[in-house]
Amino acid sequence: KAGVTQTPRYLIKTRGQQVTLSCSPISGHRSVSWYQQTPGQGLQFLFEYFSETQRNKGNFPGRFSGRQFSNSRSEMNVSTLELGDSALYLCASSFLRIDTEAFFGQGTRLTVV
Amino acid sequence: EDKVVQSPLSLVVHEGDTVTLNCSYEVTNFRSLLWYKQEKKAPTFLFMLTSSGIEKKSGRLSSILDKKELFSILNITATQTGDSAVYLCAVEVSQGGSEKLVFGKGTKLTVNP
């Protein structure tokens, strides 16, 4: 079966712009979680969506938001981009909750200039 | 604040060596500890540990959890160049009726021929 698909793979934006990243989970998976990975901070949890509802949220400013659609696809949005938002953004899908069967996508590499 | 610390941050060994990677944690509402291997972008699942003292094994990799001392180790025997990767430790914690993963910064393992 198809894995987790993230689009786009690479993105370059300028400061102040906004960006929307997409994640299509494995078919049948209802939980999608998002992570930011930077060399300095490692992988940090952004938020998790389950059945179109945000179930959990990490310690990120309100500029980071997300949503999940009825087909479980999820988007995350970052507004008013800052240089420090440059990172690899990973999403992971799982059937019910974050557990052993969390499969990660290849990520979106965002560069803010 | 939940914290996961991995050591060493990087490690260089020769093929055939045995390595031990460490992960310690301080979290509230522990549910499980997971190990992932990240070679390029998408972390891939290795083990989930929930009980102390029970070794999980997969080929040359094994892992064990000590819930009293709050740490886990990942052992790789007879290392191969294909084991070169970043190994991530994550702790699943309960928060507000759902769960999230708290990641360490990873151990970068380089296996030289």
Image: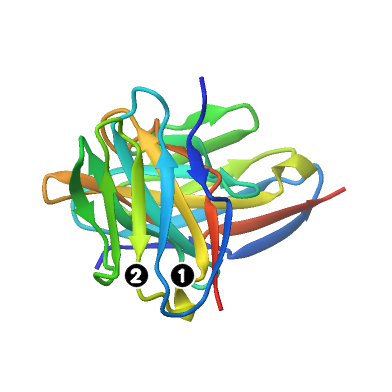
Are the numbered discs 1 and 2 placed on the same chain, yes or no? yes
Q: Secondary structure at mark 2?
A: loop
Residue A41 numbered tag: 1
Picture quarter with the C terminus of chain A: bottom right
Q: Label 1 lies in what chain?
A: A
For the residues labelled 1 and 2, the Cα–Cα distance comes to 21 Å
Residue sitting at x 19%, y 48%: A54
Could one spot residue B21 in this view of the protein? yes
Task: Quickly name the residue at label 2.
Answer: A79
- Which residue is most to the right? B113
Q: In this image, B60 relative to B67: left or right?
A: right
Residue A40 is situated, as x and y percent measured from the top left of the image, at 51, 73
Residue A26 x, y percent position in the rendering = 42, 28
Q: Amino acid at mark 2?
A: Ser
The residue positioned 28% from the left and 31% from the top of the image is: A30
Amino acid on which the number 1 mark rests in the picture = Gln
Q: Earlier in the sequence, mark 1 or mark 2?
A: 1
Which percent across, then down, holds residue A23?
Answer: 42, 43
Residue furthest toward the top?
Answer: A1
Q: Is residue B8 left or right of residue A29?
A: right
- Is disc 1 placed on a helix, strand or loop? loop
